[in-house]
Amino acid sequence: MSEPADTSRLHVAGAAPYHVLIGTNLHAEVVGMLGDSVQRVAFLYAADLGELAQPLLEALVAEYDVLALGLPEGEQAKSAAIAADCWDALGESGFTRSDAVVTFGGGATTDLGGFVAATWLRGVRVVHVPTTLLGMVDAAVGGKTGINTGAGKNLVGSFHEPAGVVCDLATLATLPRPELVSGMGEVIKCGFIADPEILTLVEKDPEAALDPAGPVLRELVERSIQVKIDVVTADLKETVATTDSAGWPGREVLNYGHTMAHAIERAESYSMRHGDAVAIGCVFVAELARLAGRLDDATADRHAATFGSVGLPTGYAGASYDDLHAGMKVDKKARGNTLRFVVLDGLAEPAILAGPSDELLRAAYDAMVGRA
């Protein structure tokens, strides 16, 4: 069966190459990505999406023995307890190394489902079907999987590339507007770190950028995914990260804004949408780079203007400096007691700022509070 005519196919190169398909009515493509050797499929889906998941579930049931496992909503799914429940279910159903996992849901479902696939029998095949804008442009591509702990977000995880990713744009029309807006946090981030045309498209018509049936959002999805593909193809496991301001930061560039974002999410007990936290984090780190003499005023100011244009928050006053500083110290980019931030030296010129002074951090924090 040939794929629908409106389908875009993006290639992810590497040791285990795969494709990301973008279009509509792509259920049959999931089956093709799983391959002929698979007999059992664990269908891990966000339980609140049961009705939306039904067509894909029926397509899988027609071909395989399917174990359907509904997951809790959002970040609640990303726990060791939920992962253990999934492992127990796979064991009871006799899943072998030749069987597979299919995820259906947002970024949290993808992270948890990918982690289960990565750890069951040290790794089984997985296909991701992200249903949110955030999942499409961030979690589903690149092979990062993970769960949260009390110490922080995504501190336990593994690299496990999927056999394929299917982005059905029709699911975006089912999203509540706040979820769609939140996904734009990762989209706009990609514009600042690598593809300024993304910023131009958003700034030209923010409402068109949020129209799930329109051509602008589709182009934003494709451009954002291509940014991530380009980065992870060059540095899948963050092995080329620099320790100072010299050189390209490698895959860490995708964590632009995330050092503060993860600290905020932790302070909010993971109740804040990830894209909202990323928007705040990007504006914070742009201010930090400006204060450090690394980033020009126009580009720094553009952060708050562009994120704000689609309704994303640009400030935060819900936690003390000391609490957020403690959260940032457990960030995966930290080295020992040294905080490291991905910053911009100019538009689409990412670099590392290592060990900024407490004075600079407090000044950037004060600016963040002032925008809340």
Image (cartoon, rainbow, N blue to C red):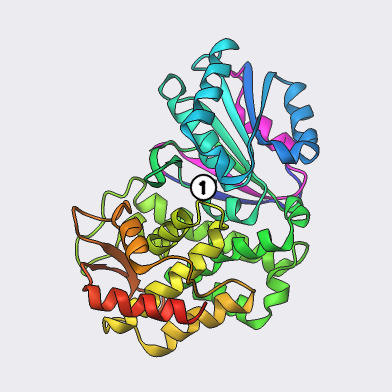
The answer to whether one can see residue 90 in this image is yes
Residue occupying image coordinates x 31% and y 58%: 326
Question: Toward the viewer: 88 or 60?
Answer: 88
Position above or below: 135 against 283: above
- First to last magenta residue range: 14-38
Residue occupying image coordinates x 59% and y 71%: 312
Q: Quadrant of the N terminus?
A: top right
Position of residue 345 in the picture relative to residue 308 (left or right)? left
Q: Is residue 36 magenta?
A: yes
Position above or below: 167 against 180: above
x, y percentage for residue 25?
Answer: 77, 44
Residue 55, quarter of the rendered image: top right
The answer to whether one can see residue 194 in this image is no
Residue reaching furthest bottom?
297
**To which residue does mark 1 refer?**
141
x, y percentage for residue 225?
Answer: 54, 56
Residue occupying image coordinates x 44% and y 76%: 368
x, y percentage for residue 280?
Answer: 48, 70
Q: Is residue 119 magenta?
A: no
Q: Secondary structure at mark 1?
A: loop
Residue occupying image coordinates x 45% and y 57%: 267
Position above or below: 51 against 288: above
Amino acid type, callout 1: Val
Position of residue 31 in the picture relative to residue 52 (left or right)? left
x, y percentage for residue 115?
Answer: 47, 34
